[in-house]
Amino acid sequence: MKVYHFMTSRDLKSISYAFIVNDINIYLPDNEDECFIAEKLLCTECNSPWHTSLLECYFCGELNYYLYLCTVCGKKYSITNSNVKCSCGDSNSKLIKACVNEKCPTNTNAIIKNLAKEEKGVFDLNSTLNLSLTYCVKCGSTTNHYATFKIFVLNGRFNESFDLYLSNHPVFEGDVILFKNEIDGKIMYDYSIYDPKMNFEPSFKYNKIKQITDELFFHKKR
Ligand SMILES: [Zn+2]
Ligand SMILES: [Zn+2]
Ligand SMILES: [Zn+2]
């Protein structure tokens, strides 16, 4: 009979931190201190991460590459220090967060170009000339959804039977059970999306949490 030991809250913290490092959002459910919720906003078409923090140019849809452009000579800088002056030394020179698309009206149309200059560039923090991204950067789809899993973590230092564990914890079909074990001095992982009809035997084939988060969230759609 296999026996499992539930991880201490410290262990649970380190696993949930590994999820955060891999860019997955984490929160702890109310009244349950032995699992965490992992969540990620994904493109519904291709499962790529959906970047809500990205901005696009209102006029042409180009993304923000955090570049500064000299308003006189057009030289580009990837600096973040606004005190830096352009090497052209022109007294009218200003470095603005411009749209990088050379065909964008903010770079070609004199009136709009001037408007963008007054707003300190399309991508200035207070500029009204950008929008939050409304499409997937990979495939262009405009629909997204949250992929959400409840994650339970079991440690290889077993002292409780798996069946007993399941009867004592609110594990439901579709929840993820993540197994951790030390094998030949290395921490190895495996996981199962819980299905009460299936008998899962962990083989500890993963050595990084990233392999698991990639499979859970970013698996390619068939
Ligand atoms: Zn643009
Ligand atoms: Zn310049
Ligand atoms: Zn997509």
Image (spheres, rainbow, N blue to C red):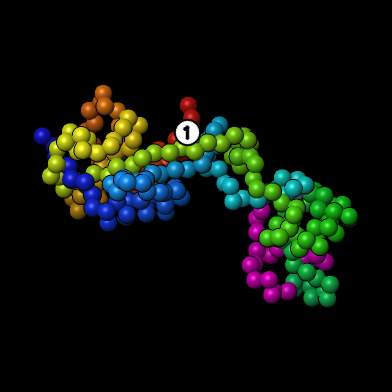
Is residue 13 rendered to the left or right of residue 124?
left
The residue indicated by pointer 1 is: 220
Q: Is residue 68 magenta?
A: yes
In the image, 151 versus 180, the foreground residue is 151
Residue 69 is at least partly visible in this image: no
Q: Residue at x 19, y 53 (%)?
A: 185
In the image, 204 versus 161, the foreground residue is 161
Residue 113 horizontal/vertical position (percent): 84, 56
- Tell me where the magenta segment starts and ends, as one range: 64-85
**Residue situated furthest top in the rendering:** 197
Q: Is residue 221 magenta?
A: no
Q: Residue at x 68, y 71 (%)?
A: 82
**What amino acid is labelled 1 in the image?**
Lys
Q: Residue at x 44, y 35 (%)?
A: 219
Residue 49 horizontal/vertical position (percent): 52, 42
In the image, 88 versus 27, the foreground residue is 27
Residue 115 is at least partly visible in this image: yes
User: Toward which corner of the image does residue 73 lie, by quadrant?
Assistant: bottom right
Residue 61 drawn above or below residue 93: above
The quarter of the picture where the N terminus appears is top left
Q: Main secondary structure of the magenta part?
A: loop
Is residue 181 rendered to the left or right of residue 88?
left
In the image, 35 versus 44, the foreground residue is 35
